[in-house]
Image (spheres, helix red, strand yellow):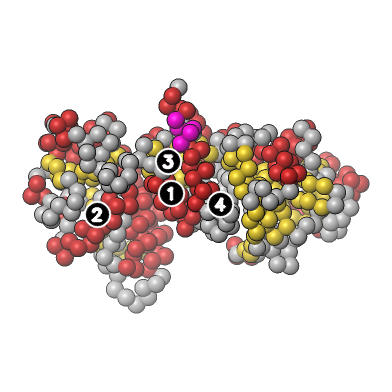
């Protein structure tokens, strides 16, 4: 049984030697599926025509009906066939194109690019090629590049047939095909064909993501070893969500945001999702968290939830400095410290422009914050996040979007104080059984929960410093169990 199959309209369309794959005509694929024994195969559709109801269209349509993973899928064909559907995506590609052009001052700009499985022969446009393939997962693409009124943009994108691959690009095509099949699919004699399809939602432009690009690739690699086909998706891939078995959100979440929309849709599809909409609702709002912790007897800093009518009470309840927070800030954003009444007044006026409620909280300085990662109601990592240099927070945000982060130290769960672990679990278990990062402060008065994060950082060299690859296996194993549970119902 082949791990993957290449489908062409005629054998002569694939003019290259068969590089270990299985080249099959589309008629054989459509009419003799049982004889070919292609169950669970990964399909590369290289037909000549992908228009609606064409033979190429039916090839992908039947592949999806048979439960096979195929590129391009039908949705991609339809979107590329109708410019109105992919107009917004082209605008996003324009931004990537212009970033690429910044490095080519004075050099000639090509009028078109050939992109094979996300690769191009022009190194200066590698980022653009990857972005195009990430958005439109078709094997062979050609894009136009034009300049209107001094502004460069991508006006058109089209799928190519193998006969349209220029002879001069034969080597690029074969290398890209080999790299793609080796990367995305596994040879059956060496490893099992993936039984699980996991989407990881991320933002490649986020300067402060919960998981960086290098670590995301580690999730992909370890997932492959575990029989999980991990695919990185972005906000533009919303329509593709039902194709996956589960969703892992690795973006900073918010309610009026596409991350919440993805979580809601995944939940409605019955897919396991981390983190789920309820967890996002509960964790992203500090007002909710403060009341939840207080009502359940989980220790936290003295906190006051106030509207504009209660501002006068702050000085009666707190000594300066006092910490002020907007309900839905993250990564130290939306958190201010007032040293006196004038600063308090200025900060509150600014915050009340964006929120009806603000949190006032007693200031607790510690050299570091504890972070306990919790998954499935069990601790999986423990870190000490140190304050940024000459600052009172872990992340110091500066003008222009720049930021500085403090150092970090990772401990095994067994090394951490038992009281820290128990307090973290008591807090996280109020939210659910997803993946949470509980932030705590420890001083001579005790241990206090500062907040619970629904999308805690997992980055190479920090959170995985103790468990190494095992941390990724724990997270991915949770998805396996959740998918198996769903399938058993």
* Residue 438 relative to residue 256: left or right: right
Number of the label disc, if any, that sits on residue 222 = 1
Give the distance between the C-alpha atoms of the residues marked 1 and 4, in whole angstroms.
Answer: 14 Å
Number of the label disc, if any, that sits on residue 467 = 4
- The residue depicted at 33 percent of the width and 52 percent of the height is 183
Q: In this view, does 174 lie above or below 295?
A: below
Give the distance between the C-alpha atoms of the residues marked 2 and 1, in whole angstroms.
Answer: 22 Å
Residue that mark 3 sits on: 198
Which sits earlier in the primary sequence, circle 1 or circle 4?
Answer: 1
- Work out whether residue 304 or residue 313 is closer to the camera in this orientation and state it: 304
Q: Is residue 259 above or below residue 178?
A: above
Give the distance between the C-alpha atoms of the residues marked 3 and 4, in whole angstroms.
Answer: 22 Å
Whole-percent x, y for residue 32 in the image: 14, 32
Magenta segment includes 481? yes
- The secondary structure type at the circle numbered 1 is helix
- The residue depicted at 29 percent of the width and 52 percent of the height is 182
Residue 146, by quadrant, is: bottom left
Number of the label disc, if any, that sits on residue 177 = 2
Number of the label disc, if any, that sits on residue 114 = none
Which sits earlier in the primary sequence, circle 2 or circle 1?
Answer: 2
* Residue 162 relative to residue 443: left or right: left
- The residue depicted at 48 percent of the width and 37 percent of the height is 479
Magenta stretch? 480-484
Q: In this view, does 210 lie above or below 271?
A: below
Residue 59, by quadrant, is: top left
* Residue 5 relative to residue 282: left or right: left
Q: Is residue 287 visible?
A: no
Give the distance between the C-alpha atoms of the residues marked 3 and 2, in whole angstroms.
Answer: 23 Å
- The secondary structure type at the circle numbered 4 is loop
């Amino acid at each position: 049984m082949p791990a993957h199959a290449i489908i062409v309209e005629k054998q002569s369309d694939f003019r290259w030697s068969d590089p270990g794959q299985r080249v099959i005509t589309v008629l054989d694929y459509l009419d003799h599926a049982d004889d070919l024994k292609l169950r669970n195969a990964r399909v590369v559709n290289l037909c000549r025509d992908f228009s609606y109801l064409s033979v190429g269209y039916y090839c992908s349509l039947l592949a999806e009906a048979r439960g096979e993973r195929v590129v391009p899928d039908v949705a991609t064909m339809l979107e590329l066939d109708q410019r109105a559907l992919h107009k917004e995506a082209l605008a996003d590609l324009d931004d990537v194109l212009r970033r690429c052009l910044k490095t080519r001052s004075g050099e000639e700009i090509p009028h078109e690019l050939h992109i094979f499985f996300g690769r191009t022969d022009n190194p200066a446009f590698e980022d653009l090629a990857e972005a195009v393939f990430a958005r439109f997962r078709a094997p062979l693409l050609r894009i136009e590049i034009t300049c209107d009124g001094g502004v460069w943009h991508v006006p058109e994108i089209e799928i190519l047939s193998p006969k349209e691959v220029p002879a001069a690009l034969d080597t690029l095509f074969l290398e890209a095909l080999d790299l793609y099949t080796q990367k995305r699919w596994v040879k059956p004699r060496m490893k099992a064909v993936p039984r699980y399809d996991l989407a990881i939602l991320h933002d490649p432009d986020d300067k402060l993501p919960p998981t960086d690009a290098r670590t995301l690739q580690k999730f992909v690699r370890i997932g492959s070893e575990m029989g999980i086909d991990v695919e990185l998706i972005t906000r533009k891939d919303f329509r593709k969500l039902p194709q996956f078995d589960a969703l892992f959100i690795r973006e900073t979440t918010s309610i009026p945001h596409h991350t919440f929309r993805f979580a809601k849709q995944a939940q409605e599809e019955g897919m396991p999702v981390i983190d789920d909409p309820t967890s996002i609702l509960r964790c992203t709002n500090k007002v909710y968290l403060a009341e939840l912790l207080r009502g359940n007897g989980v220790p936290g800093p003295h906190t006051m939830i106030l509207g504009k009518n209660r501002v006068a009470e702050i000085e009666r309840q707190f000594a300066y400095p006092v910490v002020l927070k907007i309900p839905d800030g993250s990564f130290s954003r939306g958190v201010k410290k007032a040293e006196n009444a004038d600063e308090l007044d200025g900060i509150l006026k600014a915050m009340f422009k964006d929120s009806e409620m603000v949190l006032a909280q007693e200031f607790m300085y510690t050299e570091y914050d504890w972070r306990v990662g919790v998954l499935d109601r069990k601790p999986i990592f423990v870190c000490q996040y140190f304050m940024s240099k000459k600052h009172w927070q872990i992340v110091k945000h500066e003008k222009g979007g720049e930021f500085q982060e403090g150092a970090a130290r990772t401990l095994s769960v067994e090394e951490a104080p038992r009281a820290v672990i128990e307090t973290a679990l008591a807090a996280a278990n109020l939210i659910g059984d997803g993946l949470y990062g509980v932030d705590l402060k420890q001083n001579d008065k005790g241990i206090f929960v500062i907040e619970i994060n629904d999308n805690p950082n997992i980055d190479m060299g920090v959170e995985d410093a103790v468990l190494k690859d095992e941390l990724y296996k724990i997270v991915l194993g949770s998805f396996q169990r959740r998918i198996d549970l769903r399938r058993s119902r």
